[in-house]
Image (cartoon, coloured by chain):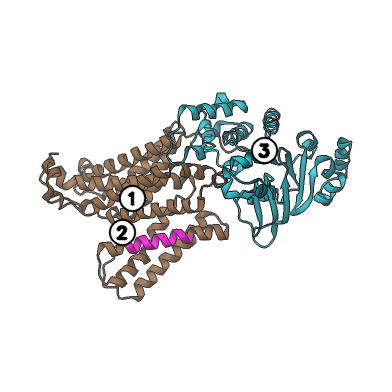
Amino acid sequence: MLELAADQGVSISEHSLDDSPLAIRGLTVSYGQKPAVFSVDMTVQTGAMTAIIGPNGAGKSTLLKAALGIVSPLSGKVTVYGKPLDQQRARIAYVPQRASVDWDFPTRVIDVVLMGLSRQLGLLGRIRARHMAQAMDCLNRVGMHDFADRQIGQLSGGQQQRVFLARALAQEADLYLLDEPFAGVDAATEKAIIAVLKSLKEAGKTVVVVHHDLATVTDYFDHVFLINTRKVAEGPVAEAFTAETLQSAYGGRLATAQIDQISRALG
Amino acid sequence: MSGEEFVPLSLTPLLIGTFAAIACALPGNFLVLRKQALIGDAISHVVLPGIVVAFILTGAISTWPMMLGAAGAAIVAVVMIEAIRRLGQIEPGAAMGVVFTTMFAGGVLLLEQTDTSTVHLDVEHALYGNLESLIWLDAVGWSSLVDLTALAGLPPELPRIAMTLVGVILFIWLFWRPLKISTFDEGFARTIGIRTGALGMALVITAAIAAVAAFDAVGSIIVIAMFICPPAAARMMANRLEAQIAWSVVFAIMSSVSGYVLAGYGPLWLGGSDAVSAAGMIATMSGLILACAAFRGPCRHRTGAPSAA
């Protein structure tokens, strides 16, 4: 962090206030009358892999979208590395839910990855050989380099998800936010994605994932954030991912048997 | 056909029809992909109150105030459609339906209540335009293209639609990358700092300006057809947006040229005596091209959306 602060010509004292990759305070989002996210605080740890978990409709995706300015919150404050989001967009990469876009869109795999370079390219900048090489390298990292010229509608769900991840890699961000990247993908894709995310973590990047599979939480993540409209728990997996917090987040919706299973997995 | 006959009688309607077709087909590509293709239809209805208001204010039928009124009404309509869509969180088709029927009805009421009954607001003119009458009487042949005095007699619709086309091309060229990204993935576009709301509005306003300029020259039937048919046919020819847009321009030109020629000579070839409406024939040709693309286009097969998780 010291180097980063120096890079930006900001004194350390200004930074030390709250230089978490993503800090959310008092965030409330509502679609219509009922709040989807209510007065949520979240502080993402630098270099951690954090899972946002909670039941369906608990506001997991909404939390992420509000943090990114995709939906407007009713109230609350979001800072990215201690600064307003608008000043830090270059440091963020976002992978939306796969089902949120029309995969019939007339574009090729490589074109989607190149979208990740658009901040670098600007409005009218030409795509040069080095940009293509960078995009191909990102496809390589997710094992999709043989599909560069395919129309995106011809891919399987898992392949589409990997293309989305490659686009995020092309952004060369410090903070990666992924919305349900493992939803409806094959086992090979899940493995490939988690390997990439772990390599990001090893490179000192911060990863936040909206996740739905409770069975894999302990294997994949080191931090969790439990939400059910309000924040339920936040912290390292060992502390915050317990039978009690799960019961509190899922209520009666999580079968006792499942909780037992998870408790056993937790030891 | 010799230059002496072709240049004064057919060159300008052909150019105007072609420019109008391209000016509508270009933004149509994005509108079709954004599932907002009906915006052309909506605009063709909402211009009525704009035209009536312009007439009430100026008291005369003259082109510029009426075009400004039409453009103003179109912009009010697209802003309202966007507002209803976003605030009401309903699909764009429904928002368009609400706005254009309301504004069209308002236009009818205004027309009835004010002293415009003596004015001849010709339905046929509004629908089919007046393409055949946009002739260039000052021209004597190809040499007139470099003759300044003859050029001064060009129908004013030609420079107007040409300027509109240049504006449309500039807009799409300048905002190509954000337009493409936000059409494909609006959420991602916002995270990289693209102001998707403003851009979407700029796109429909550009479409509205193209539509109004084209109505004036060629009538609403071509406008509605060109927003949808060439882009939809082009989508079945190509799997890249760049190629789709190129095909849509080719199809727009093919429709306008073949439609104009067939309208003028087709009935004669079939033994008839009268020509048919060029605008109607151009719209028909665009529909035929779409049908051909649907049956023979190389990219007409879709693998479909991925199954939900």
**On residue A181, which mark appears?**
3
* Chain at tag 1: B
Tag 2–tag 1 contact (CB < 8 Å): no
Quarter of the N terminus of chain B within the rendering: top left
The three-letter amino acid code for the residue at tag 1 is Ile
Residue A75 in the figure: left or right of residue B267: right
Tag 1–tag 3 contact (CB < 8 Å): no
Note the chain letter of the cyan one: A
Which of the two marks, 1 or 3, is nearer to us in this view? 3
Residue A171 in the figure: left or right of residue B21: right
Secondary-structure class at tag 3: loop
The magenta segment is: B68-80
Quarter of the C terminus of chain B within the rendering: top right
Residue B308 in the figure: left or right of residue B242: right
Give the x, y percent position of residue B156: 22, 54
Question: Within the magenta stretch, is there residue A138?
Answer: no
Tag 3–tag 2 contact (CB < 8 Å): no
On whether disc 1 and disc 3 are found on a single subunit, the reply is no
Secondary-structure class at tag 2: helix
| Labels 2 and 1: the sequence-earlier one | 2
Question: Within the magenta stretch, is there residue B72?
Answer: yes
Q: Is residue B200 above or below residue B61?
A: above
Q: Is residue B252 above or below residue A17?
A: above
* Chain at tag 3: A
- The residue under label 1 is B222
Depth check: give the residue in front, B191 or A9. Answer: A9
- Identify the residue shown where x is 52% and y is 57%: B94
- The residue under label 2 is B126
On whether disc 3 and disc 2 are found on a single subunit, the reply is no
The three-letter amino acid code for the residue at tag 2 is Ala
Q: CA distance from mark 1 to mark 3?
A: 45 Å
Give the x, y percent position of residue A210: 70, 43
